[in-house]
């Protein structure tokens, strides 16, 4: 049997620009990062929740929520240009050097408060058991056919990106999907070799659009809170003894 244990790594730097201090801003009364930590703590196959941060306040809040902060992220991986894969690789290397033996590592964004824990558990199982899979990621469908997308000029005029589909019926066009941006589950080897997150060796798990919300603007934040209430995410966490 494959080892289906996984370590969840949350990259949570302190320098959010569009929403200042976003990772620890109260989300329905509880720091956003804490909400996501609580979601992960309910998954039996997640053996550890580790936060990679450069910020002492974020580290303290993460520890108070039951997560580990065994190291501080170097400044070179905490600027506006730092991408997910190098940051997670750094964490994987540090954990392995400290004796961690799990063969699956999950990068989970601090704003993944709406993630479906069953989908994440399924992704862990897929990567753990299928050697042909480097990563497993959640995706969702575009609400409209991308083949009929348009660009808008400065004076308001429209032009189709693919004018050959001007008369194509929506139901005749191939569905397209995009990355949900909640988590990426990968093998240790895939992270260490910085393999592509999206390739023929990536397994996708489709989630409904109503479960997906990026949180990059105040409007996004309000909508995410409304979805969380609708889904009962907050109620379930309070029932489990979560932070108030």
Image: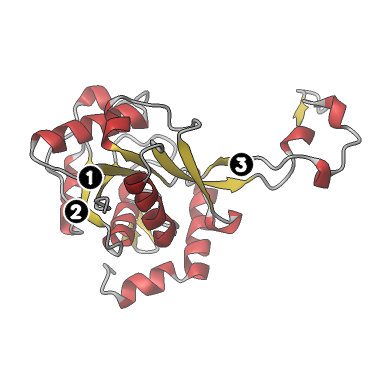
Residue that numbered label 2 is attached to: 67
Residue 170: image location, x then y, percent: 82, 44
Q: Is residue 132 left or right of residue 149?
A: left
Query: In the rendered image, which quarter is residue 70 located in?
Result: top left
Give the class, few, some or many, for how many residues have Cα within 10 Å of label 3's Cα (few <14, many ≥20).
some
Q: How many marks?
A: 3
Residue 138: image location, x then y, percent: 48, 47
Secondary structure of the residue carrying numbered label 1: strand
Quadrant into which the N terminus falls = bottom left
Colour scheme in use: secondary structure
Residue that numbered label 3 is attached to: 177
* Mark linked to residue 51: 1
Q: Verify CB contact (< 8 Å) between mark 2 and mark 1.
A: yes
Q: Is residue 201 left or right of residue 125?
A: right
Quadrant into which the C terminus falls = bottom left
Residue pictured at 16% horizontal, 53% vertical: 63
Give the mark nearest the N terminus, 2 or 1: 1
């Amino acid at each position: 049997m494959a080892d289906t244990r996984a370590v969840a790594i949350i990259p949570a730097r302190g320098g959010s620009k569009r929403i200042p201090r976003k990772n620890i801003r109260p989300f329905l009364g509880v720091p956003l990062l804490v909400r996501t930590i609580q979601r992960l703590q309910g998954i039996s196959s997640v053996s550890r929740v580790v936060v990679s941060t450069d910020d002492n306040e974020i580290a303290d809040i993460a520890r108070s929520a039951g997560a580990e902060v065994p190291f501080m992220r170097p400044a070179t991986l905490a600027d506006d240009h730092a991408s997910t894969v190098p940051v997670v690789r750094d964490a994987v290397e540090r954990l392995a050097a400290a004796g961690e033996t799990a063969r699956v590592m999950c990068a989970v964004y601090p704003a993944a408060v709406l993630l479906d824990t069953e989908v994440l558990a399924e992704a862990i199982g897929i990567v753990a058991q299928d050697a042909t899979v480097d990563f497993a990621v959640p995706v969702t469908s575009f609400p409209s056919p991308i083949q009929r997308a348009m660009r808008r000029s400065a004076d308001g005029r429209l032009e189709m990106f693919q004018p050959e589909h001007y008369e194509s019926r929506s139901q005749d066009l191939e569905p397209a999907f995009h990355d949900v941006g909640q988590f990426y589950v990968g093998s240790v080897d895939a992270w260490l070799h910085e393999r592509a997150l999206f390739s023929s060796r990536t397994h996708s798990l489709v989630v409904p659009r109503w479960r997906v919300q990026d949180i990059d603007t105040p409007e996004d934040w309000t909508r995410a809170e409304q979805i969380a209430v609708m889904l009962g995410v907050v109620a379930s966490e309070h029932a489990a003894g979560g932070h108030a």
